[in-house]
Amino acid sequence: QVQLVESGGGMVQAGGSLRLSCAASRRTIAMGWFRQAPGKEREFVATITWTGDSPTYADSVKGRFTISRDNAKNTLYLQMNSLKPEDAAVYYCVAGLFGTSKESYYYWGQGTQVTVSS
């Protein structure tokens, strides 16, 4: 079992930045982020292996978001820059196998809200 605790969500103006953090109770092959906006499907945002290799991003966030991890702290980060109103969603930290589908991840955090005002 892996416990995931997210933090760092909040409200920001369009063009601003936020950094999400996710503390994990133990290491897994990969960790990542998904998000879900009201009335929309949960979608992949970014993922990274435990070695820090192969950071992978959704096209919608590529060039604006950066995923990283600190294995000494078992913590995952998502630096979000140039935020847009369409980035507003509940962001979920995930852990499990490497991939872009929800089925790759066995463990999910409780989610943290990101609100972007225009």
Image (tube, rainbow, N blue to C red):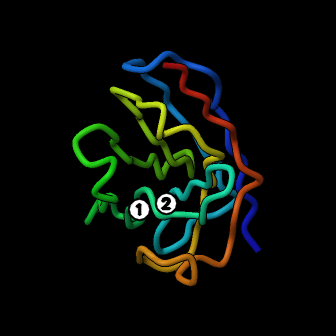
Question: With respect to residue 62, does 13 lie above or below?
Answer: above
Q: Quadrant of residue 117?
A: top right
The three-letter amino acid code for the residue at tag 2 is Gly
Pointer 1 residue: 47
Left or right of residue 28, residue 26 in this image: right
Residue 58 is situated, as x and y percent measured from the top left of the image, at 34, 59
Numbered mark located on residue 9 in the image: none
Numbered mark located on residue 32 in the image: 2
- How many neighbours does mark 1 have within 10 angstroms: few (below 14), some (14-19), or many (20 or more)? many
- How many neighbours does mark 2 have within 10 angstroms: few (below 14), some (14-19), or many (20 or more)? many
Farthest-out residue, left: 63
Residue 35 is situated, as x and y percent measured from the top left of the image, at 57, 54
Q: Quadrant of residue 4?
A: bottom right
The three-letter amino acid code for the residue at tag 1 is Thr
Q: Residue at x 41, y 18 (%)?
A: 16
Q: Residue at x 42, y 65 (%)?
A: 50
